[in-house]
Image (tube, rainbow, N blue to C red):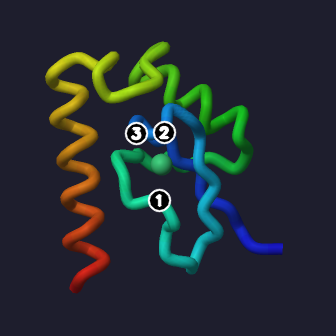
Amino acid sequence: MKTVRYAWCFSHGTMHRFPVGDAPWCTAKWVAFTASTEADALEAKQAAYGDAQFVDQLTLNQQLEVLQIGGARRREESS
Ligand SMILES: [Zn+2]
């Protein structure tokens, strides 16, 4: 069984599960969490972003943060 990486996607408004080692199938605005279960990932997402489900429900600072995380990820993947 592959290890799964949990990531909250603010574009789709849902939790994504990416098999570790595979290229993520979603290229939208998601933030990955270090968690071994989906419940833990949800808890981490709740702690960091509260009830926000989509990008427009985040504060401006959080939107920037999500954009920066996505940008850093793309740089990492293209190098
Ligand atoms: Zn997505």
* Secondary structure beneath label 2: loop
Which of 14 and 65 lies nearest the eye of the viewer? 14
User: Tag 3: residue type?
Assistant: Ser
Left or right: 56, with 14 as reference point: left
Please state, as top left, top right, bottom left or bottom right, where the N terminus lies in the image.
Answer: bottom right
What is the x, y in percent for residue 21? 57, 79
Q: Which residue is mark 3?
A: 11
User: Tag 2: residue type?
Assistant: His
Left or right: 67, with 16 as reference point: left
Mark 2 Cβ inside 8 Å of ligand 1: yes
What is the x, y in percent for residue 63? 22, 30
Which of 34 and 6 lies nearest the eye of the viewer? 6
Q: Residue at x 59, y 49 (%)?
A: 16
First in sequence, mark 1 or 2: give its number: 2
Disc 1 to disc 3: CB gap under 8 Å: yes
Disc 1 to disc 2: CB gap under 8 Å: yes
Determine the CA span between mark 3 and mark 2.
Answer: 4 Å
Q: Is residue 26 above or below residue 69?
A: below
Q: Which residue is mark 1?
A: 26
What is the x, y in percent for residue 11? 40, 39
Left or right: 68, with 55 as reference point: left
Q: Residue at x 21, y 44 (%)?
A: 67
| Residue that protrudes farthest toward the right in the picture | 1
Q: Is residue 50 above or below residue 15?
A: above
Q: Is residue 23 above or below residue 45?
A: below
* Secondary structure beneath label 1: loop
* Secondary structure beneath label 3: loop
Q: Which residue is mark 2?
A: 12
User: Tag 1: residue type?
Assistant: Cys
Mark 3 Cβ inside 8 Å of ligand 1: yes
What is the x, y in percent for residue 56? 29, 21
